[in-house]
Structures are given as C-alpha cells and as structure tokens.
C-alpha cells in the first residue's frame, strides 16, 4: 500500500474537501446534494451517459437524444422568433447529409459572432429537438476545429470531452458538466480501489459480478466497448454488481432480524375454536377464500412456539378486521389478552365499535383507551387490565404508554395503514413476554417493496374482496361542473343513501383560496335544504367527533362534510357517494383510502374528484389513475412510479438503510435474487457466527449503522 493511502474502511470519514478541485464553496454545494464523504461521491453514479466515441452525421441525429456531430457553419446571425418576436441567435450548420438549426435564447452576441463565422468547422453537442419535420438544438456546446483540420483528432484530444462514453452527473448550480466530470474522474481514479468487496466469493463468482472497486470505476467511466443501451437501462454489469451488493446486505440484515424473532420463545397457542366457531355462526357473511387462507396462516404461526410476526396486507375493504378478530379470539381462548393499536382516534373508535360488538355477544370484555379518556375511566380500565378482567383493549398510541400493564398480553394487533412503525411494534412486544404480533396494512404495496419494508415479517395477502362489491364509479370534474356531482349526490340521498364530501383543510389557515369545510357545510345546507349535514374535522373536540360519527353511522346524518380524518377505516356501508374537493391536492394513496369509504355495501357507488382551477401535471396523472382503476395494487404501483421510491417509502422512518444506487422499482428482480441468496447465506453460516463470515458481518454492521442490534438478534 502506498504511503498516505487511506484506511480501507474509512472512505466515509474522508471529507470531500480532500478531493482535488473541491474548495469550500463546492463542498457546501455538494453537501446539499447529500454528498459529504469520498465514499458518498464514489457511490454518486452518473445520471446518464453520453456516447462521444464517434461523430454522427446530421441525417443520423435522433430526436430526444444528446448527440455529437461535426458540421460547417453555413449561416450565422441574429433573428427573431416568428411566434413571440423574441430576439435569438441562430446558426445554420450542415454536413454532406443535411442541415440543422442551432439556437441561443440567452447569449452574448459579440462572443457568438466572433466564434461562429461562416465556414467555421466545429463539433457540436446538444439535445435534438423536433418541431414537426424541423430539427434544432438549443444552446449547443461546441468545440471549434482548426481550418482544414482532421475532425477525428479531437476524439483523442481530451478524454473528458471526446472519444469515449462520458458520464453526465446531476448538476449543482453554476457547475459545468466538464468541471464535475474532471473532479469525479480524479476522485474515482484515486479512491475507488480502496472500496473492497465484502460479498462472499462464491456469490461474486456465481453471477460473474465485478468486485465493487471495478464496478464503481466502470460505472463512472464505462469501457470503450460498453453497451450504451445497457448503461441507459441500468442493466450493465457494473451497475448490477453494485445494486446486488446493496440489496444483499439489506436482506442479510433482515434475515438476521427475522432469525432473532424466530429464536425467541413465545406462546404456543392451542386452537379449540371456543369463540371462533360461535362467531362464524353469528357473522352475517361467510369468510372469503382469501380471508380463510390468511387465517390459516395466522393459526399456524400462533400454534408455534416462535412468536408470530406477520403482516396482513389487503386492499381497502378486503376484510382484514374480521381476520384480526378471529386471531384475537384464539389468543383470548388461551387466557391471554389482546391489544389493538390504531393510528388515529377515529380508527380506534371504529375498531372498538367492531370488536366490542362481537366480543360482547361472546360474553367477552372489550375497552377503549385513548388520550381523551377521563382520568377516572382510565384508572378503572388500567386496573382491570392488570387484573386480567379485560380481554381486548383497543386504543391509539395511548395503549403503548408506560403504565398500561397487561396481566398477560398474548397478541398485539397493529393497524398501520400506510405508516411503517417499526418502533410501535417493538414497544408493543415489551408489554408482554414475546407476544404474537399481527400488523395490518391497507396500502397494497408492491411485493418487492413489502419485502424490504417489512422484511422481518411474514406476509399474508388478502387478495380478494367480499362478494358483491362493485368498483366505485369514479369521475374527474373541474369546479365548474360541480353541479353534476351535486345532482348525483341528490339522487343517492333520494335512494336513502348517505354521502361524504371531503376537503383537504379546515378553515383558511395559510391558504385562503381553500374552500374551508366549515364554510362549505353552510353553503351545502343551502344547496341541500332537506339533508341533515354533519361536520367533522381535526379541530373539533373528541367527544363531538364521536357524536358526529355515531350519528352518521346511525343515519341521523345524510351528508358528512369532512377533512381527511375519515381517511382511514371508517366503515358505513350505506354511504354510496363521495365528492372530493381539491382532489388534485391529495396523494394517490390518500385518494384510494378515501374512496375506499364508499362501495362497502352491495350498492353501486360513486366518487367525484373535483380539481382546483390550477393543478400540476403530476396531479393530472394521479386523477387519471383514480378514474381508470379501483385496484389498489395498480394504484400503488402507479404511485411509486409517479413519486419515485424515495418519497413513496419515506425510508428514513422505515428503519432500513437507504439505497445509494439501487432502485426498488427498477431492480426488483435483483432484489428477489439477493433476498434468496442472503437468507440462504445467513442460514449456512450459522447466522454469521462462522469464522469465514467475519468480514461480511463487519460490513453488514457498517451498512446498517445502529439499526441492527446483533446482540438482540442472536
Ligand atoms: P378493511 O379493514 O380490510 O378495509 P374491513 O375489515 O373494515 O376492511 O371490512 C370491510 C367491510 O366488509 C366491513 O363492513 C366488514 O364487515 C365487511 N366484510 C368483511 N368480510 C366480509 C365477507 N367475507 N363478506 C362480506 N362482507 C365482509
Ligand atoms: Mg379496516
């Protein structure tokens, strides 16, 4: 190793100011991109690539691509655009195969005139735009050629400019591609070699992957014979090697976590159907095949001594709650208690209504605990809970607080909707002695995602809706056409049904252009004089909220005007129509959840999405997806596509390491492969206790930072 060479494992400790060409100002700019260390920079791969190995002819130029070609200036000068009469500078350049127009909209006239006199030969680089049959380039780069010079000389002149496939990096303000390329070129050349591969050898060999150092080098500076198409698709060997490496260490961590769960001793429940059998007799419906299958999976887990750690994933309305109730009854017949934790007060209340309805009929006791529970009631509930007199406790995070003690907690049910609360699960576990854990989520996350997000949970999917459900008919209207939606609403009221009208915000806090739900309900009263209208929003006191929800459930209210507090779980089958105002301001997952409030009975249901006067293209795409499909999986896939995985996941909260290169969306198949390999590797090395897995273990701990506590996972 040369003198002054960096410590093999400390590239993440070396600041970017150590790279040549990076001063304090640039260092600050890079910090804003999330790049702090040399290691960060090595993993900051090009956004795309430009093929500058050869010149194209003008006839070969393709619209939408960044192209490089050699041509002669035929005409140059200032003109005006025909449309806006704006001053522009234009060059007409040509070669043996054709001509193309190059345009500048911001320019220094003198400088351009001096540079491009008629007859001047130059290499031009730029993105080809197409206007009808007419092609042009705006603000091209140019490399002038000496008169009579051989253009191909340029290909060998500067490797940062021509003669190879060049990386294109995401830019920070005021930084030229050339400068960033130069910095990265030096940096990668100097430091990539110190990144060592920790992947087990047999895996590198099996897939013929490149060692990380080479993979990084090749990703930044592709080989001369690299396939541009593969580079563009991200399927080149170098990138695949890096992606696999990231996924492998992610999945290895998950495998260890999962193993920790399996090792712990929990409760082996006996299933005698003491309560579940009577329940099936009084339920007004038969379980769907999917519900039955999932319940079977849960039973197997519950009967085993290892603690259950299972996720039930199912679209809105797929009937997760009944399945959770059945599991709860099994825990109860084994003389243990059950906790049900919901993310919002409304949802807790809803679960309480469902659970207590059935438990009461079976002679069991169910209580509700939330932040608003009075001191007296709370004291009584806590005492009874500790004495074991309460069979099932429903609540918000209040259930997780200190002081809430169970006599014997057997099963914790967490309704997460689309939050990924790793911490909640951990707290709940500590309320008992390795109780079983059942997590419900309504967001149908694509499989590849749930594998990573919930990698330490087993997955059960309810992929079937109860019979008779019709898809909710959905339309998108502008505010001008609101009256059609109102007519449809009126019609549903006449048929004896109920309606939701949803607003994004209550009272104009900062955005005075928002129709406030409070104001709107007054206006609606005028519009629907016969209807009983209720109002529900975040600032209403809890007791009043409950009263409103109960009235709506009992059909003492016809139209419920609400903010998104109804987003999760509210279940009123007679509600058949929903109007969402400012629908463009809601995310896809949210809209899907909202719409799931209707179409819960057998009646035909409707959803009208009313957009604001102005909305983004992205919002238009979201609304179109909603109109096109009711399928939660398709919606969440579209969501992932529109928003990108980072935002979709909010990985920060999810308790898994961030990806630097890999994309769950793009690299799903590599993820699955890596998962299989990692789980197999974990098992074959006795969960990294074998000697030859020492370096793998070291790397694993580094990647996961503090998020992987090997002491507690065996
Ligand atoms: P989720 O929580 O999955 O959104 P719920 O458990 O709230 O769905 O169920 C939605 C509605 O469907 C509830 O009114 C529930 O009683 C009803 N339901 C559940 N399972 C069935 C079934 N097998 N057949 C008919 N209705 C069902
Ligand atoms: Mg539910």
Image (spheres, rainbow, N blue to C red):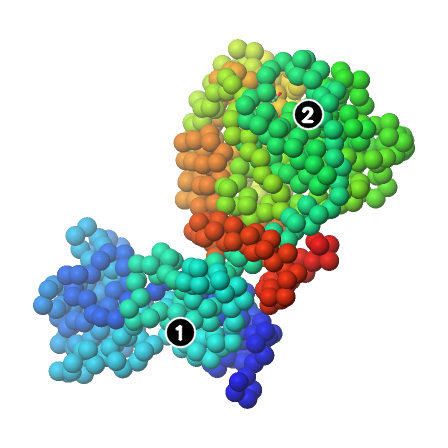
Q: Is 571 in front, or is 79?
A: 571
* Residue sitting farthest toward the left: 96
Rendered location of residue 300, percent (x, y): 65, 33
Image position of 694 (left or right of 494): right
- For numbered disc 1, what is the local secondary structure? helix
Which numbered tag is attached to residue 326? Answer: 2
Q: Position of residue 13 (x, y in %)?
A: 60, 74
Q: Residues within 10 Å of mark 1 (few under 14, many from 20)?
A: many
Q: Nearer the viewer, residue 226 or 521?
A: 226
**Quick check: can you spot residue 200?**
yes
620 relative to 493 in the view: left or right = left
Q: Label 2: state its secondary structure.
A: helix
Looking at the image, the residue that sits furthest to the top is 495
Which residue shows up at 45% across the image and 27% down it?
474
Which image quarter holds the C terminus?
A: bottom right
Mark closer to the observer (2, 1): 2
Q: Is residue 646 visible to the viewer in this orientation of the structure?
A: no
Left-right relation of 379 to 78: right
Q: Kindly identify which numbered label has been placed on residue 181.
A: 1
Give the image quarter of residue 299.
top right
Kindly identify which numbered label has been placed on residue 254. none
Residue 103, x across and y down, in percent: 24, 64
Q: Quadrant of residue 102?
A: bottom left
**Residue found farthest to the bottom:** 3
Q: Is residue 63 above or below residue 381?
A: below
């Amino acid at each position: 190793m040369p003198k002054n060479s960096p410590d093999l494992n400390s590239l993440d400790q070396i600041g970017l100011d150590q790279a040549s060409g990076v001063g304090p100002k640039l260092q600050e700019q890079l910090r804003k991109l999330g790049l702090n260390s040399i290691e960060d920079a090595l993993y900051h791969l090009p956004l795309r690539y430009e093929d500058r190995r050869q010149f194209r002819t003008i006839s070969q130029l393709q619209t939408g691509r960044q192209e490089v070609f050699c041509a002669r200036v035929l005409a140059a000068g200032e003109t005006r655009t025909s449309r806006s009469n704006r001053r522009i500078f234009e060059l007409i350049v040509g070669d043996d195969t054709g001509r193309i127009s190059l345009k500048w909209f911001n320019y220094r006239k003198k400088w351009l005139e001096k540079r491009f006199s008629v007859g001047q030969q130059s290499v031009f680089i730029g993105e080809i735009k197409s206007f009808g049959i007419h092609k042009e380039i705006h603000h091209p780069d140019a490399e002038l050629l000496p008169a009579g010079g051989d253009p191909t000389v340029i290909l060998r002149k500067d490797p940062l400019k021509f003669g190879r496939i060049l990386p294109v990096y995401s830019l920070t303000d005021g930084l030229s591609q050339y400068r960033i390329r130069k910095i990265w070129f030096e940096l990668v050349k100097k430091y990539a070699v110190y990144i060592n591969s920790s992947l087990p050898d047999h895996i590198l060999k099996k897939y013929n992957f490149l060692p990380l150092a080479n993979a990084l080098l090749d990703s930044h500076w592709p080989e001369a014979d690299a396939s541009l198409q593969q580079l563009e698709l991200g399927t080149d060997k170098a990138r695949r090697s890096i992606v696999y490496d990231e996924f492998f260490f992610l999945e290895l961590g998950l495998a260890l976590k999962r193993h920790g769960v399996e090792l712990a001793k929990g409760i082996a429940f006996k299933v005698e159907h003491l309560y579940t059998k009577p329940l099936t007799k009084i339920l007004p419906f038969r379980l769907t095949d999917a519900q039955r299958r999932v319940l079977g999976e849960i039973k197997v887990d519950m009967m085993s001594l290892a603690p259950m750690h299972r996720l039930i994933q199912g679209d809105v309305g797929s009937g997760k709650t009944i399945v959770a109730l059945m599991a709860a009854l099994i825990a109860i017949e084994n003389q243990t208690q059950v906790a049900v934790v919901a993310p919002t007060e409304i949802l807790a209340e809803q679960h309480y209504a469902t659970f207590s309805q059935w438990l009461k009929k079976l002679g069991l006791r169910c209580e509700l605990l939330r932040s608003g529970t009075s001191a007296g009631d709370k004291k009584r509930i806590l005492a009874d809970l500790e004495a074991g007199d309460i069979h099932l406790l429903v609540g918000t995070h209040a259930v997780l607080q200190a002081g809430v003690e169970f006599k014997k907690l057997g099963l914790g049910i967490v309704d997460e909707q689309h939050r990924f609360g790793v911490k909640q699960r951990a707290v709940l576990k500590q309320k008992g002695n390795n109780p079983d854990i059942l997590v419900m989520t309504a967001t149908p996350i694509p499989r590849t995602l749930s594998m990573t997000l919930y990698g330490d949970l087993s997955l059960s999917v309810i992929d079937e809706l109860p019979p008779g459900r019709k898809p909710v008919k959905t339309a998108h209207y502008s505010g001008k056409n609101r009256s059609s939606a109102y007519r449809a609403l009126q019609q549903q009221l006449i048929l004896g049904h109920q309606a939701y009208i949803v607003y994004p915000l209550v009272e104009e806090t900062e955005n005075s252009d928002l129709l406030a739900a409070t104001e709107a309900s007054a206006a609606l009263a005028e519009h629907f004089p016969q209807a009983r209208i209720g109002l529900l929003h975040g600032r209403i006191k809890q007791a009043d909220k409950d009263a409103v929800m109960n009235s709506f459930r009992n059909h003492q209210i016809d139209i419920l005007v609400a903010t998104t507090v109804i987003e999760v779980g509210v279940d009123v089958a007679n509600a058949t129509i929903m109007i969402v105002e400012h629908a463009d301001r809601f995310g896809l997952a949210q809209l899907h959840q909202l719409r799931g409030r209707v179409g819960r009975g057998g009646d035909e249901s409707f959803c009208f999405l009313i957009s604001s006067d102005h909305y983004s293209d992205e919002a238009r795409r979201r609304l179109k997806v909603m109109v096109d499909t009711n399928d939660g999986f398709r919606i969440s896939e579209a969501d992932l596509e529109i928003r990108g995985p980072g935002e979709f996941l909010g990985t920060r909260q999810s308790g898994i390491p961030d990806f630097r290169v890999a994309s769950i969306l793009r690299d799903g198949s590599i993820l699955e492969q890596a998962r299989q390999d990692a789980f197999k590797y974990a098992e074959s090395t006795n969960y990294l206790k074998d000697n030859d897995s020492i370096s793998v273990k070291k790397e694993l701990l580094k990647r996961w930072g503090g998020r992987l506590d090997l002491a507690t996972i065996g």
